[in-house]
Image (cartoon, rainbow, N blue to C red):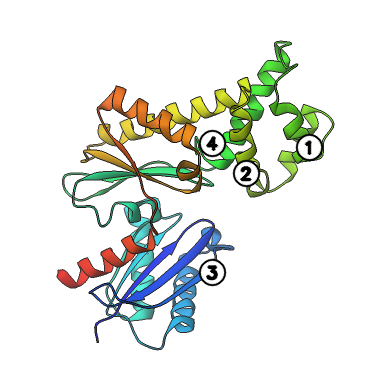
Amino acid sequence: MTVLLGIDAGGTRTRLRLARPDGTVLARAEHSAEDWPALGVEDKARAVESWLGELTGTPPSAVGLGAHGCDSEAECEQLRIAVQARLRAPVRVVNDAFLLIAAESAPSAGLVVGTGSVAVAWDHEGRALHTGGWGWLLGDPGSAWGTVRDAVRALHHAQDRGELDGDPLLPVLLRLAGADSLREVKRRMQRRPARSWAEWAPQVHAVAGQGSPAALAAIESGAQSLVDNIGDLLVQGGRFSRVIGGGSVLVNQPRLAARIGDLLRERFDLTLCLYRGEPVAGALALAAQLLDG
């Protein structure tokens, strides 16, 4: 029996789906991503083998794997070789953002905005292109941690100008951080894992609806930078006529999505389409493509 294995190994959780080529789902599983981004290639391959063993005793005919942290073709190829050696089946590995566009008939770019952010596309020769994805310290605009970081930066600038009073974001961040001053918020962010304060992002978006200048500035900055990332894909030779957007922040924050959509139309005459399905379906599409040759 021909069996396809699709894996979406994202930054927060990993989803697996075993299916027949006609789409019939045979089994599914979900795991916390835990230390996946920090694992070496061989450890990642062992993790995939272990997940498959828990899911089924049936060896897959082909495997599609979208892997968070595989940000170049070289990294994807290294992981492909390691996973294929363990599963003894043809494997294709892409950055997990490509799962949004793997099954698209029209040429599309993928824009994922969740805990982090990245934009991807293929060029005319089928090469993978990436922009963004530099992490909370250097980039990931519009993402959960990028939005919180940029909002706190905007508050610091306001304080330096003597314009901090009255911004409704300040008391919210003081409460979330358990701090009594903006400087203490900064110190607590520096001491905590970025994922912990990234969880404040929904409150930043909520306060933007109350007119917070800092929250609105962070969202605008994120939207502008994300659209810059799409422009960088075009400069690299990306081939796409629309942008498929996904990720927990982009899908659940309409203000950000609307602004990105407006900027894409204004600057590049591109349409943003939000993807609300499960990206693991794209991993199954990649596996099916391997069988189709």
Residue to which mark 2 is pinned: 198
Q: Look at 52% across and 62% down and name the residue there.
A: 13
To which residue does mark 3 refer? Answer: 31
Q: CA distance from mark 4 to mark 1?
A: 26 Å
- Of helix, strand and loop, which one carries label 2? helix
Q: Which amino acid, mark 2?
A: Ala
Q: Nearer the viewer, mark 4 or mark 1?
A: 1
Residue at 49% over, 73% down: 47
Q: In whole angstroms, how far apart are the C-alphas of marks 1 and 3?
A: 31 Å
Q: Amino acid at mark 1?
A: Arg
At which x and y percent is residue 190? 72, 40
Residue 166, position as x, y percentages in the image: 73, 18
Query: To which residue does mark 4 refer?
Result: 138
For marks 4 and 3 on the same chain, the one whose residue lies earlier in the sequence: 3
Amino acid, disc 4: Leu
Q: Give the position of the N terminus as an image quadrant.
A: bottom left
The CA distance from mark 2 to mark 1 is: 15 Å
Which label number is shown at residue 119?
Answer: none
Q: Residues within 10 Å of mark 2 (few under 14, many from 20)?
A: many
Residue 283: image quadrant is bottom left
Q: Is residue 270 above or below residue 164?
A: below
Name which of mark 2 and mark 3 comes first in the sequence.
Answer: 3
Side (left or right) of 11 relative to 279: right
Q: Quadrant of the C terminus?
A: bottom left
Left or right: residue 80 versus residue 292 is right
- Identify the residue at image location x=73%, y=27%: 170
Q: Nearer the viewer, residue 107 or 277?
A: 277
Image coordinates of residue 146 in percent, x first then y, are: 56, 37
Which quarter of the picture shows residue 86? Answer: bottom left
The mark found on residue 175 in the picture is 1
